[in-house]
């Protein structure tokens, strides 16, 4: 092969070189005795190369052809060099108008080179083939110890940094003589070279790579002799390499790079070609010009087999100073271990419709495939990107048809495998690939040999995959579509390396498309039996019912809170929380009407709250009876007694499951059911308000108001006491009026068809007390029998206050304690005369109810008789 290339070189030298024959003979002799090395265009187009020459597009303007070149560079290459070695660079464009070469060391020291006495200039094809030191004099940079690492080399085209619409390079055969374009708008470079020479003067190969190559080839799609036919090596981040043969594809102006996930979304491969090549279509694609991250790796395109002395990592200038990049890592066989399935809230083996976490350890970074078999045959397949070490994968608890699995236990035999050394070739705007790209895995050593005789797929493989189902006209006859359109089972790239398009002028299938071809090393499939319970239950507070029968007699309210699990799953560890308003004090808590299987795990209570952990089987019910007392007036409003039931972790409730990352902590948050704010309308929370009023008969009640619950549209109330009437305004219902009849009356107001909120009113209409007044009509001054005025109360046992006047004087009062009906006032007997006692009102001391009276007693106080004498008449 070497001799054949030299014969071709001889022909070129005879045709193109201005040197005398004697000099040419000397040059040829030196070639036979000292093989030349350079890395760059010479390796793409060695002597005898087939096809057409693709020129290096080297402009970074943001205006022109961004759909063909979305990742523009100034012909950026990277070279690893050790201390004491020499980096040699040259191009055909240096010194041509704005053509330059910019070299930047790992520590950020940058130098821009222009041609000087032809140093750094590759003048023609013959010189390109001879290489540095023979065909041309390169620019040489000695690497200091502090600058050992990966250097960045940029080849600036004649256009410099100006905008240019130049898109068509010359029509030049790969093995033909070329001419560097010299126009000030030229974006292309014909030849370029980056070489490394060690301290002993030997040229080295496998030190130079690119992350992305933007290339232009003459727009002639009629045959493979006009196609892009180059060979290069792609080194992956996990230490394996592939030999790549472009095999006659043609993109006119196209982008060539390789990564680990193709057209990914958030680092996860889509394993799809795209129906466009514009910026919008490529939104999820990791920029190959930038640094790698945990999920996105840009592979390195080498012109030759990577050198055996490449370190695992190196200091580098990729986008900034003192960065680090990987080079040759030790390959690790991909293995997935320690597979577990947990609910997203952390419970192993228990998952809800909120989702599940599949966790595993990966021996190497790569892409994974997890298959969860389903009884209905709709197996769920999850693909994604794995990092080395611990990984978490979200599963939405759906089968392969997108349907949620029914609640209950399942025991799937989960199958996993990990792909490593995964390479994708996202061809952007590659019009045709009629013969298919050839991708071959090299041996796992530093020789990188390709040995098709190996039967172990981890030692040799030429299998490739693709999926063009998103492409318009895919599979349509006459459109030169890929065939098959979808290849997910794998096919030899030597027979069909994703062929599409044809050598013709019509129906170029890849034009303005983004075509992905990929391959990988696949670990052995592993299976693991996993026990999972899918849990989903409708927990609810069915009702809060206040018993007000002892409200006035014992200042007591007895609440019955009905808790229910409508299933279908059991809810172990559900949290019941009951909170009473200020003014009420819990005196006792009892459980009643428990369904079979209900378990009280724990409970605690304070003066105004009760909290319990419950196990509630499917369809279980439970009554919690809370006796609460109050002090002080009967006229109190005990607003919003609240009862809530909170789901346990990794059990979903259809109307009370938040989408937060943490487990259930707050019933109100869960009741929002994923909404960012507002009022939750779940059935897990109920409120009750008690409005107590103690009124005198014939007095207007304090209006009782109730606001329509947000989950309803109509208000309702129970039968009202006579003379009370409802009024509605702006979603509120108010009950008002005068209760004429004495006694205890109750009613409720609520929202129709919901039990979320309710107000219960209890009103005691206290009958006004009555009274009479009694006393002697005639008494004598100084009478010794202590005559009194008696006020007699009736209609109450709570004690009375009697108001009276004496002879129209000031109003005076006299009271008696509860249980005593009569009050007396002593009659003054000092002076004779007439005393008028007038009863003007009587009041119930407990209720304050009173009745006006107008009853009087007139007492005549007679003077004592004077001394009597008897006159005797004679």
Image (spheres, helix red, strand yellow):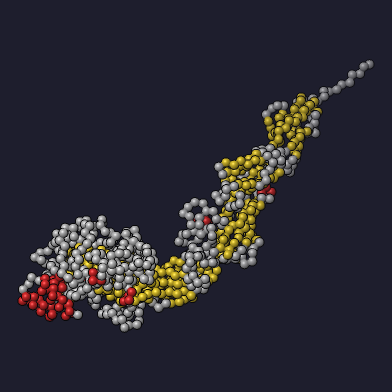
Relative to the observer, which residue lies in front, 97 or 19?
19
Relative to the observer, which residue lies in front, 465 or 664?
465
Q: From this viewpoint, which residue is outermost toward the top?
A: 874
Left or right, 846 with reference to 320: right
Which image quadrant: the N terminus? bottom left
Left or right, 777 with reference to 286: right
Instruction: Give the residue at x 74% y 37%.
Output: 770
Instruction: Give the residue at x 58% y 65%.
Output: 568
Q: From this viewpoint, which residue is outermost toward the right?
A: 874
Q: Quadrant of residue 866?
A: top right
> So how many labels did they put on this image?
0
Q: Position of residue 857 (x, y in %)?
A: 77, 29
Q: Is residue 865 above or below residue 99?
A: above
Q: Is residue 594 above or below residue 777?
A: below
Instruction: Give the residue at x 63% y 61%.
Output: 622
Q: Position of residue 31 (x, y in %)?
A: 13, 78
Instruction: Give the residue at x 26% y 59%.
Output: 65
Q: Position of residue 12 (x, y in %)?
A: 13, 73
């Amino acid at each position: 092969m070497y001799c054949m290339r030299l014969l071709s070189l001889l022909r070129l030298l005879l045709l193109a070189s201005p040197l005398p024959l004697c000099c040419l003979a000397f040059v040829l002799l030196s070639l036979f005795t000292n093989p030349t090395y350079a890395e760059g265009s010479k390796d793409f187009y060695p002597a005898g190369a087939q096809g057409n020459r693709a020129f290096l597009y080297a402009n970074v303007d943001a205006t022109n052809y961004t759909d063909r070149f979305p990742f523009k560079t100034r012909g950026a290459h990277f070279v690893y060099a050790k201390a004491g070695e020499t980096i040699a660079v040259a191009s055909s464009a240096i010194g041509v108008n704005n053509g330059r070469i910019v070299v930047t060391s790992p520590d950020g020291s940058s130098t821009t080179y222009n041609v000087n006495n032809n140093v750094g200039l590759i003048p023609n094809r013959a010189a390109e083939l001879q290489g540095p030191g023979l065909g041309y004099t390169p620019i040489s940079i000695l690497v200091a110890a502090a600058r050992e690492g990966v250097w960045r080399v940029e080849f600036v085209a004649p256009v410099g940094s100006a905008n240019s619409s130049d898109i068509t390079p010359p029509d030049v055969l790969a093995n033909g003589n070329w001419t560097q374009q010299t126009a000030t708008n030229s974006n292309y470079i014909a030849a370029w070279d980056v070489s490394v020479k060690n301290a002993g003067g030997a040229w080295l190969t496998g030190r130079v790579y690119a992350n992305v190559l933007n290339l232009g080839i003459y727009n002639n799609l009629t045959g493979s002799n006009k196609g892009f036919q180059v060979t290069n090596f792609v080194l992956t981040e996990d230490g394996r390499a592939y030999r790549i043969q472009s095999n006659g594809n043609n993109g006119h102006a196209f982008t060539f790079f390789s990564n680990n996930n193709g057209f990914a979304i958030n680092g996860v491969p889509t394993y799809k070609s795209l129906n466009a090549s514009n910026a919008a279509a490529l939104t999820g694609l990791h920029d190959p010009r930038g640094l790698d991250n945990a999920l996105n790796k840009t592979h390195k395109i080498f012109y030759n087999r990577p050198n055996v002395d490449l370190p695992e990592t190196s200091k580098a200038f990729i986008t900034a100073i003192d960065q680090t990049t990987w080079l040759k890592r030790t390959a690790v066989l991909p293995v997935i271990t320690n597979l577990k399935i947990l609910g997203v809230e952390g419970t192993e083996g228990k998952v809800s419709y909120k989702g599940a976490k599949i966790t595993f350890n990966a021996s190497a970074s790569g892409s994974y495939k997890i298959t969860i078999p389903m009884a209905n045959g709709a197996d769920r397949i999850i693909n994604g990107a794995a990092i080395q070490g611990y990984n978490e994968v979200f599963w939405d608890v759906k089968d392969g048809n997108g349907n949620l699995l029914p609640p209950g236990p399942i025991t799937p035999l989960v199958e996993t495998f990990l792909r490593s050394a995964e390479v994708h070739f996202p061809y952007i705007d590659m019009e045709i690939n009629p013969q298919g790209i050839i991708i071959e895995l090299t041996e796992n050593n530093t020789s990188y040999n390709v040995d098709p005789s190996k039967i172990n797929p981890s030692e040799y493989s030429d299998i490739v995959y693709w999926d063009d189902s998103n492409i318009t006209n895919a599979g349509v006859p006459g459109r030169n579509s890929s065939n098959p359109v979808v290849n997910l089972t794998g096919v030899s790239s030597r027979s069909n390396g994703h062929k599409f398009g044809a050598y013709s002028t019509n129906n170029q299938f890849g034009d303005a498309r983004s075509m992905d071809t990929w391959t990988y090393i696949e670990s052995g499939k592993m299976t693991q039996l996993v026990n999972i319970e899918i849990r989903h239950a409708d927990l609810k507070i069915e009702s809060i019912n206040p018993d007000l029968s002892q409200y006035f007699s014992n200042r007591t309210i007895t609440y019955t809170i009905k808790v229910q699990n409508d299933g279908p799953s059991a809810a172990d560890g559900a949290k019941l929380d009951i909170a009473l308003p200020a003014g009420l004090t819990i005196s006792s808590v009892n459980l009643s009407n428990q369904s079979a299987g209900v378990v009280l795990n724990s409970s605690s209570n304070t003066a105004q709250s009760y909290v319990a952990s419950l196990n509630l089987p499917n369809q279980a019910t439970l009554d919690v009876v809370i006796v609460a007392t109050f002090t002080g007036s009967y006229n109190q409003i005990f607003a919003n007694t609240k009862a809530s039931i909170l789901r346990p972790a990794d059990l979903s409730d259809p109307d009370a499951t938040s989408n937060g990352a943490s487990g259930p902590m707050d019933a109100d948050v869960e009741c929002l059911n994923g909404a960012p704010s507002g009022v939750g309308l779940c059935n897990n929370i109920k409120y009750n308000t008690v409005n107590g009023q103690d009124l005198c008969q014939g007095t207007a009640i304090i209006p009782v108001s109730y606001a329509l619950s947000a989950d309803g549209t109509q208000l309702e109330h129970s039968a009202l006491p006579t003379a009370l009437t409802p009024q509605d305004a702006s979603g509120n219902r108010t009950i008002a009026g005068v209760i004429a009849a004495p006694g205890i009356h109750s009613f409720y107001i609520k929202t129709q068809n919901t039990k979320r909120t309710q107000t219960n009113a209890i009103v005691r209409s206290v009958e006004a007390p009555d009274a009479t007044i009694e006393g002697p009509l005639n008494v004598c001054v100084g009478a010794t029998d202590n005559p009194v005025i008696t006020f007699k109360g009736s209609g109450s046992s709570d004690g009375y206050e009697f108001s009276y006047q004496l002879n129209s004087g000031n109003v005076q009062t006299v009271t008696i304690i509860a249980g005593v009906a009569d009050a007396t006032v002593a009659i003054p007997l000092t002076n004779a005369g007439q005393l008028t006692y007038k009863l003007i009102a009587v009041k119930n001391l407990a209720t304050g109810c009173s009745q006006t009276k107008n009853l009087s007693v007139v007492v005549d106080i007679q003077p004592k008789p004077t001394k009597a004498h008897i006159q005797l008449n004679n």
